[in-house]
Image (cartoon, rainbow, N blue to C red):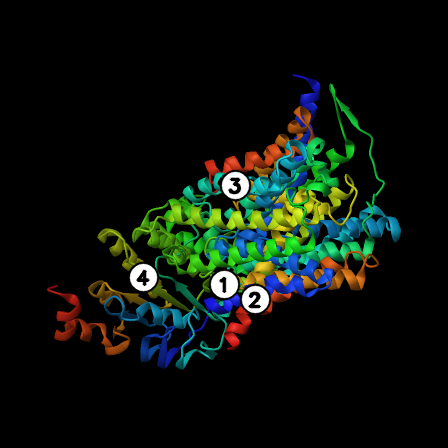
Amino acid sequence: MEGATLSLEGIRAGYGDFQALFDVGLKVSPGEAVGVVGPNGAGKTTLLRVISGMLRPKAGTARFGSTDIATTPAHMLPAMGIAHVPENRRLFPHLTVEENLKVGAYIPAARRRYAERLAYVFDMFPRLRERRHQLAGTMSGGEQQMCAIGRALMSSPRILLLDEPSAGLAPLVVAQVFALVQRIRAEGLTVLIVEQNVAQVLRVVDRAYVLDAGHVVAEGSSAALASDPKIRSAFLGGH
Amino acid sequence: MDPFLLEAIVNGILLGGVFALPVLGLNLVFGVVDVVWLCYAELVMVGMYCVWFLHTQAGWPLILAFAACLPVVAMLGLLLHLLVVKPLLGSPPITQVLATGGVLFILQGGAMLTFGTDFRSLGVEMPPMEVGEIFVSGTKLVAFVAALVSAAGLWAFLKFTYVGTAIRAIARDREVMPLMGVDPQRIYLVASAVGGGLAGLAACLLVVQLDVHPFIGLSFGPITFMICVMGGLGNMLGGFLAAFLMGVIISTGGFWWNTEMSYVVAFVFFIVVMFARPRGLFAR
Amino acid sequence: MIRAAIALLAVLAALPLFGLPEYFLHLGIATMLSAVACTGWAMMGRFGLVSFGHGAFIGIAAYTMALLWNYAGLTPWIGLPAGVALGMAAAALLAYPCFRLRVVGHYFALVTLAAGEIVRILIVALRNITGGSLGMTPRLSPDNALAAMQLGKHGFWWLAVAVWAFALLAWWWIDRSMSARALTAISEDEDAAASIGIRVTREKMMITLVSAGFAALGGALGAQYRLYLNPESLAGIGISLQIVFGALAGGMYSMLGPTVGAAFTIALEETLRVSFGTAFIGAAPLVYGVLLVLFILFLPRGIVGWFERKR
C-alpha cells in the first residue's frame, strides 16, 4: 500500500476539564520513523489516542492522507491504514495467540489476506508461531508485546503507532523489542513511537518530538536531539 | 439403581438441555452488552406463540413454523436492544435491568391481549421410547438432541468466525475494540440478534413439550437466571454445565419430594452455591 | 419544616372525619401502605443495593401474621410485629453472607430474586396450611374486630397514616445520620470506604434490615387490610418488581419520591381497572410495562427527581 502523510496541527485535547495537549503539531511522512518522547504525564499517550480516534480533539486538525481523523469514527481508522498498539498491550488474555491475531485481522481487507498476514507475523515472531494455541494471558511480558505488535500488523497498516513498547519489560527484552521496531521500519512501514526510554528510542527513529506538559518543547533529528545538552540533561541523565 | 431414580436423572439431563439454550442466549447478551435481559423467558414465550399460531391457526407445516420463529424472535431481540437497551447503555445496571423488566410486562400483557389466558397446545406428541429399563419421552429426547446441536453450532460460530472471535474478545475489553476496526455497536446488534435467535430456538424445543400461556415465562425465567449466575454471568461453558446440574437437581428433587419442593431445593442450592462461590461455580 | 409536617399529618389524620367517600379512603389506605413498602425498598436501593426479592420479606411477614391468627388465634397486633421480625431475620440470613462474600450488582439482584421465588413457591407448596395459589383469608372475627385488627376503613386509615409517617421519619432520620454518608461512600467505592474505617458490612446490614422491615410492614398490613393473601401478590418476582417500579417512578433519591410513585401506580392500576375492566385482559400489564420503560428512558430520577431538577 502506498504511503500517506500523518499531520496534526494545533491539537488540543483532554479529559473532562483536564487539558492534556496544547496546540500540538506533528508530521510523519511515509516511510519515516518518528519518536515522541517526554516524561510521564506529558501527554504522549493522549496524542496517540487522538491519532487512532479513541479521543476526539477539542480543537485543531488531524489528517492521515486524505482522511480527517477528527471526524472519522475510531473503528473506521484501521481500514484507512492506522494500527495502534495501545499502552499496556491490551491483549485478550483469555483468547489464544492466534485468536488475538484473528481479531487484529477483523477488517474486510485483512480477512481476505489472513493466511498471508499470519505467515508474515509468524515469520517475524517465530515465538508466536510456537505458542499460537496458548492463551495470550499466560505468556511473558515480552511475548505479549510481540503478540500485540503482531495483532496490529495483521491489518497491513500504513502507519504503526506504538505506545511505550518497552514499558515493564526486562532490559534484554527491551533491546529485542527495539530491534524489532528497526526491522519493521526497514520494511518501509511508517512508525510513530511514544517512549519514556529516550536513549533507546532515539537510536531507532529518524526524528523525534519532545513533549512536556502537553506542549511540544523541541523537535529535530535524532542525532541533533541526542547531542542537545538540554535534552541530554533532562532525559538522558549521565548516559 | 432404582429405575425410577435413573429415569429421573435421565429426565433431568434432558431438562438441562432445554435450560441450556436460554442460558447460552442470556450469557451471550450479558457477556457482550453487559445487560441482563430480565424479559428473556418472555421472548421465548413469544416464540412459542409464534410457532403455535403459524402451525395450528395458519396451518403452516411445523418445520416452516419453526423456521419462521427464529427470525421473528431474533428481530425482537434486535428491537429490544435498539429501543430499550441502547439508549440506556451509559446508565447504572439497575435501570437497564428494570427497563427489560418493563418489557417483561409488555410482552406478557401483549400475549394476554392477543391470545387470552388459555393454555395453547401444539398437539404434537411422540411416543415414549423404552431404553433398557426406563421410558424416555420421544419429544424430550429430540428436543435435547436439537439443543445440543444448536449449542455446538453456537460454539463453532464463536470459535471460528471473525465476528464470533470479536464477541469473545469484547466481553473482556470493549474500549480497545475500535483499534482493531471493530464497531462495538455492531457487535452488540449481532449479539442481541443471536441472543434473540437462541430464545426462538428454545421456543421451538419448548412448545412441543409444554402448553403455552402468557405466564409461562415466569415458570422457567427465574431458574434460567439462576443457572446463568451459578455458571458465572457471561461464562458460556459454566452456564451450559450448570444447566444440566440444575436439570438433574430439579428432576431428582421431583422424584424424592414433589415438583414445587424440587424448585425450592434448586433455589436453595443456588443460594448456597452463591455463598460458596460468589462469582459462580466455574469462576477461575 | 417539622411544624408543616405535623400540620400535614394532622390534616391527613382528620380527613376521615369529614365524611370522605369510602372509595377515596380505600385508595388512600392502599397508597400509603404501598408507599411504606416502596419507601422501604428505596432506603437501600438509593445506595445501589438493588434487591429484586423484597417480596420474600413481605410474604414471610404476611403469612406469619395470618397463620398465627388462623391457627393459633394470636392477634395480628402481635403477629404482625412477629412476622416483620421474621422477615427481617430472613433478610439478615440472606444479606449477611451476600455482603461478607461481596455478592454485588447483578449477582446480588439475582440472588435476592431467587429468595423471593423460594418464598413464593414454598407458600404454594405448603398448600395444606396456606391455601396455595388460591390464597387464604384471615378468619373473620366481627365480635372482636379490634383485637383481630379487622378495623374497617377509618381504623386502617389511621393505622396507615401512622405507619407511613413512621417510614418517612425513619428516612429523615437515616438521612441525617452518619450512616447515610457512610453508605454513599460505600456505593461509590467499597474498598475506598473500607480503607477510611467505614464498617461496610455492618452499614449495609443495618440499612437492609430497616429496608426489609418497612417493606414487610407495609406489605403485610396491606394483606391484613384486604383480608386476603395470595403468593403471587405477596411474594415472588411480580410484587418485587412492582415495588421497585413504584420507588423508581416516584424517584428513589427523595424522601417523598417512593410515596409519589406508589400513588402513581395505584392511580394507574385503578384507571386501567376502571377503563378496561376484564374486557381487555392484559391491557393493564401492557400499559404498565410501557410506562415503566418510558419512565426509565425519560425520567430516570423519577417524578419527584424531575420536579426537583426543574426548580
Q: Where residue B141 appears, x then y in whole percent? A: 73, 33
Closer to us: mark 3 or mark 2?
3
In the current view of this chain or complex, which residue is farthest to the top?
B1
Q: Where residue C116 appears, x then y in whole percent? A: 60, 43
Is C269 displayed left or right of A225 in the figure? right
Which residue is under mark 4? A181
Which residue is under mark 3? C85
Are discs 3 and 1 less than 8 Å apart at CB?
A: no
The amino acid sitting under disc 3 is: Ala
Closer to us: mark 2 or mark 4?
2
Query: N-terminal of the two: label 1 or label 2?
Result: 1
Residue C302 bears which disc, if any? 2
Residue C253 bears which disc, if any? 1
Q: Secondary structure at mark 3?
A: helix
Chain to which the residue tagged by mark 3 belongs: C
Q: CA distance from mark 1 to mark 2?
A: 9 Å
The amino acid sitting under disc 4 is: Val
Chain to which the residue tagged by mark 1 belongs: C
Query: N-terminal of the two: label 3 or label 1?
Result: 3
